[in-house]
Image (cartoon, grey):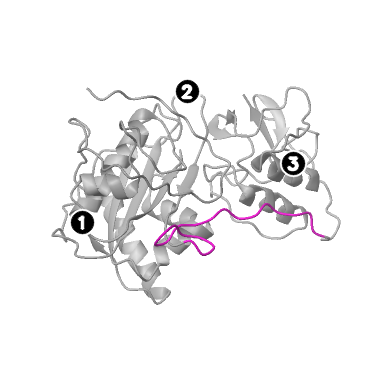
Amino acid sequence: MISRRKVLFVGAVCLPLLLLAALLAAPAPAGRASHAMDQEELNFLALINDYRAQNGAGPLTLAPALIEASEWFANDLATDDYFPFSHRDNENPPRDPNQRAAAFGWNGGFVGENILGGVFVDTAQEAIDLWKGSPGHNASMLYAGFSVIGIGRGFNAQSTYSWYWVTDFSSGNPGGVATPTATPTATPSPTAPSAPTPTPALTPTATPERTAAPTATPSPTATAPPTATATPTPTPLSATATPAGVPYLWGDVDCGGQVTVGDAQKLARLLIGFSVVQDGGCPPVNQPVRADGRRTAWGDVDCNGQVSVGDAIKISRALIGMPIVQNPRCFAIGSTVGIS
């Protein structure tokens, strides 16, 4: 029996790194095989092909080996409750996307991968919208060199992020499947059970060619942390009503009582490994919390499931009145939420 370790990553990385290894992986363990594609997975295929057509890229064809690999990985993330920014799974030895796809029979081109986790992200539309908002993941979806795809979605109500999405991209002969049958699986609605853990892990993580986004064949590189630019002096956002739990302002990273440029700067410093000062009792950045009863992570101001430089940028933009993109079920920056 292959031993497994439980790992929880709530990362501070905007874009993923794809780590390449020399060892070829063994086949997936028994009992963890993927299931037939469900309707939301098929909806994602239609959405991504429409999106690629709008941006001058060719359509993607379903590849059976990549479907199996992505389904297996999505369900493994949910079952073992982990989120690896390296894209390596929990097998022994761990496998990267290329090794994992090879274990399921893929013998085409290099494999690029996006991964995502999020309590609210149960639909294809929500998943693609979040990936569109991340330069690295967006580059993966629009990379013209990709011609085939595998799509997987996993769910575990007791896991950190509940819903997990994996898309594996490559080029070459799809190898056979073009008509998977939709199985409308009775997937539980992503209402949080009783376990304290973060919300959307957009922990999207991408992989295509590294320019400013993808890896090897595409694979994104991390965006530089925002620097404090000489923008108009922001007016600190103030509190409103007080919900259940300890009241904090959404986006007040250091719990200083107001959302300021200092919160954006502190978040950016933490993400690149510097220490910062927070008020006593303030949740550490990336700590799983409940915000008005919803599972999330402190500092994930856009509720995309990952604390990143993008959150620092969004705090800065909100302070000067610029529009920002958040998960539709997220909290307005500067609004009061009960944290427990």
Q: Name the image quarter holding the C terminus.
A: top right
- Up the image or down, 287 lies above or below 55; here it is above
Q: Amino acid at mark 2?
A: Ala
The percent coordinates of residue 242 (x first, y second) are 71, 30
Find residue 108 and report its horizontal and vertical position in percent. Answer: 23, 60
Q: Nearer the viewer, residue 281 or 95?
A: 95
The reply to whether the C-beta atoms of the residues labelled 3 and 2 are less than 8 Å apart is no
- Where does label 2 land, which residue? 195
Residue 11 seen from this side: yes
> Which callout, 1 or 3, points at the residue further toward the start of the chain?
1
Q: Earlier in the sequence, mark 3 or mark 2?
A: 2
| Mark 1 touches mark 3? (CB < 8 Å) | no
Tell me if I can see residue 188 in this picture.
no
Question: Which residue type carries mark 1?
Answer: Asn
Element class at badge 2: loop
Q: Is residue 94 left or right of residue 325?
A: left
Q: Residue at x 48, y 61 (%)?
A: 210
Q: Which class describes the residues within 10 Å of circle 3: few (<14), some (14-19), or many (20+)? A: some
- The N terminus lies in which quarter of the figure? top left
Mark 3 vs mark 2: give the one in front.
3
Figure disc tally? 3
Quadrant of the rendered structure where residue 323 is? bottom right
The magenta stretch is 210-229
Task: Tell me residue 248's x, y (percent).
Answer: 72, 32
User: Which residue is denoted by mark 3 in the rendering?
Assistant: 266
Q: Can residue 323 be found in the magenta stretch?
A: no
Amino acid marked by disc 3: Lys
- Which residue is disc 1 drawn over? 107
Which numbered disc, 1 or 3, marks the residue closer to the eye?
1
**Looking at the rendering, which quadrant does residue 27 occupy?**
top left
